Image: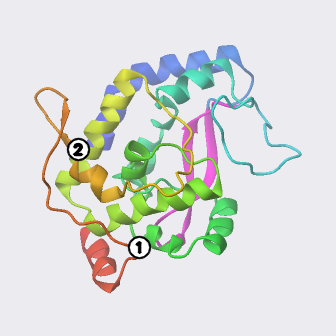
Amino acid sequence: ALAAGMLAVFSIPFAVLALLIRLTSPGPVIYRQTRVGKDGKPFTLLKFRTMWVDAEKGTGAVWGQVNDPRTTAVGKWLRRLRLDELPQLWNIIRGDMAFVGPRPERPEFVQELERAIPFYTYRHLVKPGLTGWAQVAYSYAATADASREKLRYDLYYVKHMSLLFDVLIVASTAKAVIQGRGVVAATPRSGSTESPASTHQGTAVSAASGAVRPSDTGASSPSEPDVGQDERNEATRVQ
């Protein structure tokens, strides 16, 4: 119901964005792409098109990057403000996605990451999200090494998911969009002592002011990116 209401509210902005995309580059307004969802099941994800048509022709699936030469002028702006993801409200209505959860990856990348990263499949215990803890706390993963670090945040979310945690993530996402921070490429941090839990513990969202301030959440950091049977059961109950 919330996603349907947001679609109605954004109907006029959607029309304006669709017109801008249509007038500035040839091709469809909505881009459809297969992604991997809950329990590893594929679904069709919707986005506003930000790249030139046939941008991956001859190369196949490749990692996205900051200042991606495949993006159009309008597409760069849409990505910076994360507006290209708004059509996924329809995916939420269809039940493919949730507002908050690990971002869905393409099957080609999932196969690669499952071979390279232990426990990667555990992020598929819950529905993928329009936004997620990894997106607001770690930023954009453009390599397999960055995805390994990002997975720690995804699994931390799966283990500690709650309504309050979701509100924090949504508020942080809204703040990023308003400030125009958008996507910044993540650089793997060798030897970093920062953890998903320390970021969570040091952040709380003030609904009144939108400020970010220290807070004691009492959460503990998992020493490894593991999700046991209890967490799998918890993830199942929350859905």
- Residue 89: numbered disc: none
The residue to which callout 1 is attached is 224
47 above or below 24?
Answer: below
Residue 192 found in image quarter: bottom left
Report the quarter where the C terminus lies. Answer: bottom left
Determine the residue positioned at 37% across, 77% down: 227
What distance separates the C-alpha of mark 1 from that of mark 2? 21 Å
The residue to which callout 2 is attached is 203
Which callout, 1 or 2, points at the residue further toward the start of the chain?
2
Amino acid carrying label 1: it is Glu
Residue 104 at x, y = what percent? 52, 56
Residue 228 vs residue 84, the one in the foreground = 228
Determine the residue positioned at 47% across, 53% down: 103
Dot 2 crowding, Cα within 10 Å, few <14, some 14–19, many 20+ = some
Q: Is residue 35 magenta?
A: yes
Q: Is residue 218 visible?
A: yes
Dot 1 crowding, Cα within 10 Å, few <14, some 14–19, many 20+ = few
Most distant residue in the bottom direction:
229
Main secondary-structure element of the magenta-colored stretch:
strand
Q: Is residue 180 left or right of residue 64?
A: left
Residue 30 found in image quarter: top right
Task: Report the magenta residues as a range.
Answer: 30-51
Residue 225 at x, y = what percent? 42, 71
Residue 49 at x, y = what percent? 63, 32
Q: Is residue 54 left or right of residue 193?
A: right
Indicate the secondary structure of the residue bearing disc 1. Answer: loop
Amino acid carrying label 2: it is Thr
Query: Disc 1, disc 2: CB below 8 Å?
Result: no
